[in-house]
């Protein structure tokens, strides 16, 4: 059997970034073709591996977008209701401040108007949802009054001892 050099072409750095999370192995199936199998690493294989989290995953994409995508972009950081006919859900920008390059603070408790979750659509075929949800429509229309502003984050990682991380560990499941 002779040794054969395979030229893989240009290196795709995005694949190398995922290397700690995947296990790959070369399997020869006895034929002329070779198969490279890749599988997701198990939790036990990842124990002790520092997994980097990209808080601002779209930075490279943003310059490629047309200008109209950035009109009123400050709304991305607002906590307002998103309304689609009978469905009203809040957009909680304050829960992902690092995604906007800002220091993460302890978020306010979520807003859950009781009447929304008790809503039945039975017999409401001709409902004017803009009148039914007038308070949420008004809140959406004043969205620029609900924009979060924080200090810029000078480090890509939150310290385990930061006020937010201490709060986070107390309030999440393990």
Image (cartoon, rainbow, N blue to C red):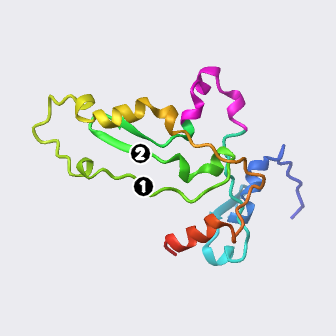
Q: Is residue 52 magenta?
A: no
Query: Within 10 angstroms of label 1, few (less than 14), some, or many (20 or more) residues?
Result: few
Q: Which mark is residue 90?
A: 2
Q: What SS does tag 2 mark?
A: strand
- The image quadrant that residue 72 belongs to is top right
Rounded to the nearest angstrom, the CA distance separating label 1 from label 2 is 8 Å
Q: Nearer the viewer, residue 74 or 99?
A: 74
Q: Would residue 15 be found to the left or right of residue 83 on screen?
A: right
What residue is at 21 percent from the left and 28 percent from the top?
Answer: 128
What residue is at 84 percent from the left and 43 percent from the top?
Answer: 10
Give the farthest residue toward the front: 145
Query: Within 10 angstroms of label 2, few (less than 14), some, or many (20 or more) residues?
Result: some
| Residue 118 vertical placement versus 88 (above, below) | below
Which residue position holds label 1?
A: 110
Residue 144 visible in the current orientation:
yes
x then y, percent, for residue 83: 36, 36
The stretch in magenta equals 60-75
x then y, percent, for residue 158: 70, 62
Location of the N terminus by quadrant is bottom right
What residue is at 85 percent from the left and 52 percent from the top?
Answer: 6
Q: Would residue 171 be found to the left or right of residue 121 on screen?
A: right
Callouts 1 and 2 close, C-beta under 8 Å: yes
């Amino acid at each position: 059997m002779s040794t054969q050099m395979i030229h893989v072409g240009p290196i795709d750095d995005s694949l190398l970034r995922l290397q700690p999370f995947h296990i790959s192995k070369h399997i020869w199936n006895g034929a002329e073709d070779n198969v490279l199998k890749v599988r997701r690493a198990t939790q036990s294989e990842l124990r002790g591996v520092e997994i980097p989290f990209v808080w601002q995953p779209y930075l490279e994409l943003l310059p490629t977008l047309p200008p109209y995508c950035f009109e009123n972009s400050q709304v991305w950081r607002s906590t307002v209701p998103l309304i689609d006919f009978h469905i009203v859900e809040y957009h909680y920008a304050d829960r992902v401040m690092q995604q906007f390059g800002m220091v993460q603070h302890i978020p306010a408790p979520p807003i859950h108007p009781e009447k929304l979750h008790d809503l039945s659509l039975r017999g409401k075929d001709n409902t004017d949802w803009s009148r039914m949800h007038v308070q949420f429509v008004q809140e959406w229309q004043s969205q620029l009054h609900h924009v979060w502003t924080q200090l810029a984050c000078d480090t890509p990682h939150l310290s385990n001892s930061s006020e937010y991380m201490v709060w986070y560990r107390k309030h999440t499941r393990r």
